[in-house]
Amino acid sequence: MTEFVFAPPAPVGVPVRGSDASFPVRRVYCVGRNYAAHAREMGSDPDREPPFFFCKPSDAVSYVADGTEGSFPYPPGTSNCHYEVELVVAIGKGGRDIPVEQAAGHVFGYAVGLDMTRRDLQNESKKTGRPWETGKAFDHSAPIGPIVPVAAIGHPQKGEVTLSVNGVEKQRGDLSDLIWSVPEMVSYLSKLFELQPGDLIFSGTPEGVGPVVKGDVMQCRVGGVGDLTIKVV
């Protein structure tokens, strides 16, 4: 039995809706600019870019239960923290070089999530050609609702993706607007990394991203998957 110099951290678990079990988070991958309007909003040409990915640590995941209001601690080092509502894909079967036509079989379920972003730090990283970790991978940067199994909802290919701040709608899109579909992004990612059970993929956000301040309440929805309400504290 391995002896550690101190107790290793407990695994991060996201409860599964309709079950007493939790989904153990291994890695968190995020797809950049996967809605055409958002890509243009961020200054890119969606018709020319293949998908690209960045990562967050597993302990950036912060769970919010159905019907409750979660909290998001406003992060240090920024004065421009943005929301990005996303469909989250939970991988239940690993693999490498997964064909697109088989990719859906590797998905365990789906959730509503937020890719919170220190936009000022991300923009500075872009200008200097440095990694995005300070802008994307900070503590509590990946709030998420319960994972809904495929057995309960199938594979949603359309459904509204919305976010409101203090009751005012800021983001609206539809899953049918994804540039790269869930099977395509799973397949593409599996050519870069060997996917494993427990991996999460944040699938990209619609246009309308913007800042929040302490006291703001974000209300998120992915049609057919669920809702997520979080207060900035």
Image (cartoon, rainbow, N blue to C red):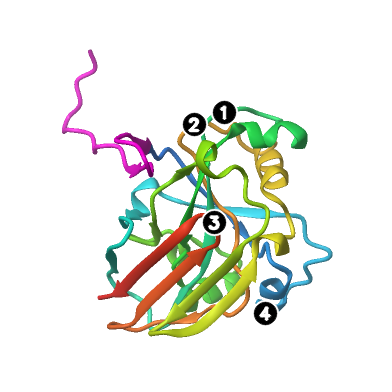
Quarter of the image that includes the N terminus? top left
Numbered tag placed on residue 71 in the rendering? none
Q: Measured from the top left, where is residue 103 in percent x and y?
A: 68, 35
Name the residue carrying label 2: 197
**First along the sequence among labels 3 and 4:** 4
Numbered tag placed on residue 224 in the rendering? 3
Element marked by disc 4:
helix
Instruction: Judge whether residue 194 is colored magenta.
Output: no
CB atoms of marks 2 and 3 within 8 Å? no
Q: Measured from the top left, where is residue 179 in percent x and y?
A: 74, 60
Image height of 38 relative to 168, above or below: above
Image height of 46 relative to 80, above or below: above
Residue 41 position by quadrant: bottom right
Residue nearest the observer in this picture, 51 or 216:
216
Let me know if residue 25 appears in the view: yes
176 left or right of 231 in image: right
Q: CA distance from mark 3 to mark 1?
A: 25 Å
Numbered tag placed on residue 94 in the rendering? 1
Q: Measured from the top left, where is residue 154 in percent x and y?
A: 59, 42
Q: Amino acid at mark 2?
A: Pro
Q: CA distance from mark 2 to mark 3?
A: 23 Å
Q: CA distance from mark 2 to mark 1?
A: 5 Å
Q: Amino acid at mark 4?
A: Glu
CB atoms of marks 2 and 1 within 8 Å? yes
Q: Which residues are magenta?
A: 1-23
